[in-house]
Image (cartoon, grey):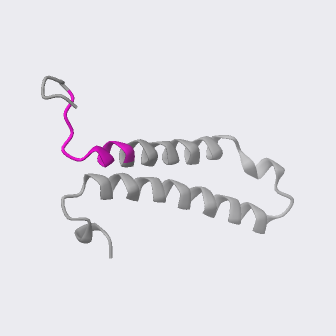
Amino acid sequence: MSMDSPINFEDRLSVLGVLVGGFVIVVGFGTLLGAPWTTAVNTSVLLVQLLGIVATIAIGVVLVLVTYADDPGEILP
């Protein structure tokens, strides 16, 4: 990237981390808004689906937080 570019990133992978994290969050919310519980036959299937949706959104949020963190060891246990 040339020095004349108005967009300059110190770490080019940070852009990728934020984009992928944001995509994972959007997919999680899209799945939630798709109302997957309407096709669930029993409650255990519903709980597993909701747990998977919440885990997907959490993974996306953690990915974005780790990307923006100066020291990822402070955020992660």
Magenta-colored stretch includes residue 11:
yes
Q: Determine which quarter of the picture holds residue 41.
A: bottom right
Q: How many numbered marks, from 0 up? A: 0
Q: Nearer the viewer, residue 4 or 50?
A: 4
Q: Nearer the viewer, residue 74 or 39?
A: 74
Q: Nearer the viewer, residue 58 or 13?
A: 13
Considering every residue shown, the one lying at the far left of the view is 3
Magenta-colored stretch includes residue 44:
no
Considering every residue shown, the one lying at the far bottom of the view is 77
Q: Determine which quarter of the picture holds residue 19.
A: top left
Tell me which segment is drawn in magenta. Answer: 7-16
The spot of residue 76 in percent (x, y) is 32, 71
Q: Nearer the viewer, residue 66 or 33?
A: 66
What is the quadrant of the C terminus in the image? bottom left
Considering every residue shown, the one lying at the far front of the view is 2
Q: Please give the name of the residue rendered at 28% of the width and 67% of the height, measured from the top-left corner.
A: 75
The spot of residue 33 in percent (x, y) is 64, 41
Indicate left or right for 42 with 30 as reference: right
Q: Please give the name of the residue rendered at 52% of the width and 41% of the height, measured from the top-left corner.
A: 26
The spot of residue 8 in percent (x, y) is 19, 34
Q: Please give the name of the residue rendered at 47% of the width and 59% of the height, measured from the top-left corner.
A: 59
What is the quadrant of the N terminus in the image? top left
Residue 4, above or below 41:
above
Residue 56, above or below 28:
below
Q: Please give the name of the residue rendered at 69% of the width and 41% of the height, measured from the top-left corner.
A: 34
Indicate left or right for 66 with 7 as reference: right
